[in-house]
Image (tube, coloured by chain):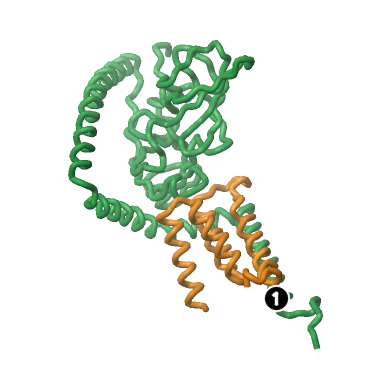
Chain colours: A orange, B green
Amino acid sequence: MILRRIAIGVTLVSVALWAPWPVFLAGLVLAALLIEDYYEGVAIGLFFDLLYGNASASSVPLGAGLVLGALLAGPFLRAHLRWYS
Amino acid sequence: MTRSRRTDPARTSRTGAFVVMLCMVGVLTLSPLRSTAERLVIFIAGPFLSAQEASARGINTFFQTFHSTTALIEKNRELTARVAELEVRVLDRNILAEERDELRGLLGRTPGSEGVLAFVLASPGSSPYDTLILDVGSAEQVSEGDRVFMGENVVIGTVTQVYEHASRATLHSTPGTQVDALIPGVDIFITATGRGAGTFEIMVPRDVAVIAGDPILLAGTARILGVVYGIEQKESDPFKKVFFRTPFNPSTLRFVRLAPTTDHAFEEDSLTP
């Protein structure tokens, strides 16, 4: 399980470096939705926000909201939707 | 015996981890700690971004070997013709530039500096913020507020954060950013609003003569901000929306030039002292 999470993390970082940013964001949201307690995804997103963003308040991205929402939605979907768990 | 939801330790630890993470996101993105965190991230990521740029070019070259020979020959022919056309334009431009420098000399103005050449480690294609990560910093005499040029005369942004061997520049076209601009010939000062990826929009009175291909200058300078590519006008509206963009796509940038705003060559060429 840990190896799988590491592999997913490495894949996401590679996508962030080599693919357009919407692809990275979609991958991050999907990983947060499907993987339980995927806090390392938030750390990866934060890393790239610090790398590319600037100091203005508007740099807090919509993406953070999407990822955090996916983290909250994941357990709920797993508990209530048979096909999801 | 079923566990009460309220005392479920797994749920409690998950809630606690979530709250800690939320606080961490808030602190690092909104507070002064951000600049320290940014410095550390740039230091770690710098070598990886350089490697990423080199490998992206290598991969591109590899895949180009699979293009058909006919397509490559046709593309080569097209580009050769385009280069010949641009060489003629550059000759005209060089003559004008020499005349300008001569006039500056007569007026006692010193010629502008070459500036600092910077390699772009990351461009807006990788980032949603319309920022450039550059491989030069305070060690190379880069300062906050330095102008970023694409080519000789196209100004695209300013340096907003400087580290020792890296810096971050924010493009003028960042969504929501406003910059003062000028329509030459018409001499109307306007405020251009960034739309992202090198594109801008401005609102001008409907009777202002602007057509696709017209340059838009940065106000108070003779530097090009962009070139008009589209105009949107409604019958009943007294204003029309003009769209313009940088001549080159910022996401394909590899090198830029940085020049301080105290550089007199940056100011508008004028025969009045």
Q: If the image is split into quadrants, where does the C terminus of chain B sit?
A: top left
* Depicted B101 relative to depicted B271: above or below: below
Label total for image: 1
The quarter of the picture where residue B79 lies is: top left
Say which chain tag 1 marks.
B
Q: Residues within 10 Å of mark 1 (few under 14, many from 20)?
A: few
| B193 over B164 or under it: above or below | above
Where residue A2 appears, x then y in whole percent? 51, 78
Would you identify the image quadrant in which residue A15 lies? bottom left
Query: Residue B155 at what x, y percent from top left?
Result: 42, 31
Q: Is residue A78 left or right of residue B214?
A: right
Image side of residue A31 versus residue B99, left or right: right
Name the residue rendered at 23%, 32% in the picture. B78
Residues B234 and B167: in front is: B234
Q: Which residue is disc 1 drawn over? A: B13
Q: Nearer the viewer, residue B226 or A70?
A: A70
Q: Position of residue B185 (x, y in %)?
A: 44, 12
The extreme front residue here reads A83
Q: Is residue A83 above or below residue B33?
A: below
Label 1, secondary structure: give it.
helix
Quarter containing the N terminus of chain B: bottom right
At label 1, the amino acid type is Ser
Q: For the point 54% across and 54% down, which residue is it?
A: A49
Q: Position of residue B33 (x, y in %)?
A: 60, 56
**Which residue is depicted at the point 55% across and 23% down?**
B241
* Residue shown at 42% from the left, 50% from the top: B166
Q: Nearer the viewer, residue B61 or A46?
A: B61
Query: In the orientation shown, which residue stands out farthest toward the bottom?
Result: B1
